[in-house]
Image (cartoon, helix red, strand yellow):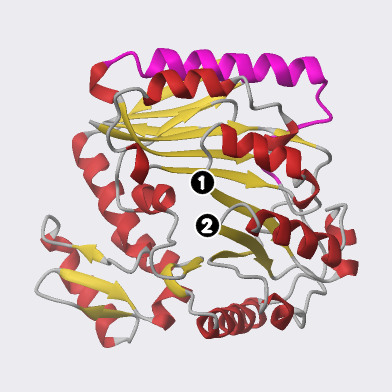
Amino acid sequence: MAANLYVHFPFCRSRCSYCSLYSRVRASPADRVAYVARIADAITQKFKSASTQTLSTLYFGGGSPALCDLSPLRVTLKQWKKGQTCFPLFEFTVELHPLDVTPAKLDELKSIGVNRISMGVQSLDDDILRAMGRGYTASDAARAFALVKSRFDNAGIDLIIGYPGDSIKWLDSLRDWGVVHCSAYSLQNERGLKDVPDDDIVLDRIRAVAAFLKTLGLERYEISNYANPGFECRHNFAVWRGEDYIGLGEGAYGREGLKRTRGTKGGYETSEVSPAEDLKERTLFRLRTRDGIDSSRFPEWRSTLDRFVAEGLLVKIDESVYRLTERGTEVCDTILEELV
């Protein structure tokens, strides 16, 4: 059985002003070494079972995974790869902070099998980057991404839309970067930032981002994600399409059958949902994607979905499949709330 594995590395140089995610700031080198050793052991233990031996996608997120020496995982991953005939199609993503990007680090990532990079740019306004606490300039980010592209064809960036004062006038400066994937997330103001623009302004900026990315050949395949054809993030797409994913490490979430897991500093918290809840969750996730939602198992949704079609928020593909319109992507949460 194929599986998708997410490994969380919670280490950060400092906490960004907008971030409320679990992180460990300025952890010691010894802590990071011990953490990688625990992850290596967890991967080995997880894939001893023949039923989960084949891995389809692997994603190292954070935090900043590259603050750790990841080379000890080389042996672990080589042991796992033996006999996997599907490996040439395997996607292995690592998230990078621009300050992580050095020739030595990129070579290290290549050596453990990484074939996709996602770099957190967030903005290209130096004043905004300073307010965010990112620690680099727009020029630094451009140089870092150029270095990434010199070694990885499959490389994309993350942007945050709606940070106070960021007018995204810098958008066109991305034109020559060679970006093949972009995640553009609206700011979730969970830390109480002041002067956050209202929803209409944020939506206008997201529309501007979508229109610009389309000129680069990047099509929207999920509410916040755009890619050139063939460069969609297969790991995240698998999650949105309702596949299982294993979560390892502090702050990592997982979905395996009916089991839900969350990594903590002391281990893993687990819970279980009913088969009906599981089916509903996996089905609803798909609405975020260009695939749309198949309502054939939920006839009670039909009247609500048809109403959203009449309102221009959904388009009906066939008897049971509905897909978001461009306007629908802007109010997807409202649609999901009604279905839930």
Q: CA distance from mark 2 to mark 1?
A: 7 Å
Assign the N terminus to one quadrant of the image: top left
Magenta span: helix, strand or loop, mainly?
helix
Q: Which region of the structure is painted magenta?
A: 20-49
Residue type at mark 2: give it. Answer: Asn
What secondary structure is marked by label 2?
A: loop
User: What label does residue 156 carry, if any?
Assistant: none
Q: Is residue 104 left or right of residue 284?
A: right
| Residue 178 place in picture, x, y as percent | 61, 70
| Residue 220 place in picture, x, y as percent | 44, 73
Identified at 51% across, 46% down, the residue is 115
Q: Is residue 101 left or right of residue 61?
A: right
Question: Decide: marks 2, 1 in contact (CB < 8 A)?
Answer: yes
| 137 vs 208: above or below | above
| 268 vs 56: above or below | above
| 11 vs 192: above or below | above
130 in the magenta segment? no
Q: Nearer the viewer, residue 164 or 218?
A: 218
| 337 vs 76: above or below | below
User: What label does residue 115 carry, if any?
Assistant: 1
Q: Is residue 234 left or right of residue 293?
A: right
Identified at 88% across, 52% down, the residue is 135
Identified at 77% across, 45% down, the residue is 102
Residue type at mark 1: give it. Answer: Asn
What secondary structure is marked by label 1?
A: loop
29 in the magenta segment? yes
Mark 2: give few (<14), some (14-19) or many (20+) Cα within 10 Å: many
For mark 2, what is the residue? 154
Q: Quadrant of residue 170?
A: bottom right
Instruction: Report whether residue 266 is seen.
Output: no
Q: Quadrant of residue 106?
A: top right
